[in-house]
Image (spheres, helix red, strand yellow):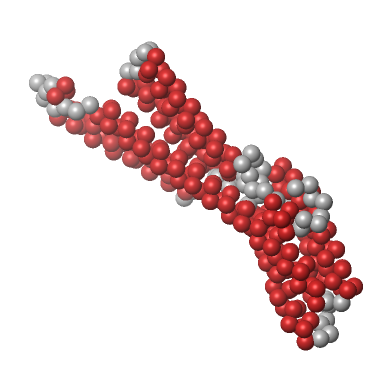
Amino acid sequence: MSEWLVLSLAMAAACAVVLSIAFFNHRRIGEDDDPNETPDVIEYMTMMIGVIYAIVLGLAIAGVWEGRGAAQEYVRQEAQALHEISVRSEVYPAEVRARIRSDVDAYVTHVVGTEWAVMADEGELTARGAELLERVRRDVTDYVPQTDHEGQAYQPLVDQVAVVDDMRSARGDSAGATMPGVVWFGLIAGALVTVGLIFTLQIRRSFREMLLAGLFSALIAFLLFLIWDFDAPFGRGISATAEPFFQQFPRLDLGG
């Protein structure tokens, strides 16, 4: 059985149970019952729905903000590992060292100059970036250390290449939108229900009530926009930046 069918049946069952209880309870009440003597449940339900929706909005904002922070950390670790490769290759012969640093610079230049825009527009990495990283890997792993000093530097360099590869993959996984469509459906439906419940309280046309209703609706719209903006860590306004690459490779003309 599909999970969506299970969800639909569960929601329908919950509504049916509540409505059935309300129906039979209404038939049990006598004709002399005065509803004005009982608390108005509308205000309580409106308040609870607003509180529940506020919690959902808070969790959604926290989730996308955490995803953006993680994406920025992937970039920082990738840039740091590339910097370590460039620096630690100092112990190798001049020709090998120059080749490693040249390929690292080419990879960084491609990531910042080309791949970053592709991540923002298409939510994926480039094949060229993978080729340049593979070239760096070959530079490091194919060289056979000639001295003990070079041998001691070999494994740390290989480890740093693995870190770059891992962080690059994590960066690619974070490039697109992360919020599932069903969550967006719940957020938008919840916003419509929450704003719509304003009218169940018999809102009047006084300036104060209209102003508060407008501000409340605008606040929900702003929070939804904030979630949408954070949802793509590399593709929208408040996005992760390439600043770690600028800091670690100031000698390159990266435009930072």
Depth check, front residue: 174 or 192: 174
- Specify whether 212 is left or right of 243: left
Q: Residue 229 at x, y = what percent? A: 59, 39
> Is 39 left, or right, of 104 in this rendering?
left
Question: Quick one: which residue is furthest to the top in this view?
Answer: 205
- Please state the total of marks drawn on the protein image: 0
Q: Residue at the location (66% across, 43% down)?
A: 235
In the image, residue 167 sits, relative to residue 89, either above or below, namely above
Residue 126 visible to the viewer = no
Q: Can residue 203 be seen in this view?
A: yes
Residue sticking out furthest to the bottom: 148
Q: In this view, does 106 lie above or below 50?
A: below
Q: Which quadrant would residue 250 be assigned to in this image?
A: bottom right
Q: Which residue is at 88% across, 74% downward?
A: 94
| Residue 203 image point, x, y percent | 35, 18
When asked about the image quadrant of residue 143, the answer is bottom right
Q: In this view, does 89 lie to the left or right of 178?
A: right
Q: Which residue is drawn at 12% across and 23% down?
A: 33
The answer to whether 110 appears left or right of 54 in the picture is right
In front here: 71 or 197? 71
Occupied quadrant, residue 29: top left
What residue appears at the point 52 percent right and 35 percent down from the top-left corner?
224
Residue 89 coordinates in the image, percent (x, y)? 79, 72
| Residue, far right | 95
| 244 is higher (above) or lower (below) than 11 | below
Looking at this view, is 181 or 159 the one in front?
159
In the image, residue 223 lies at what x, y percent? 50, 35
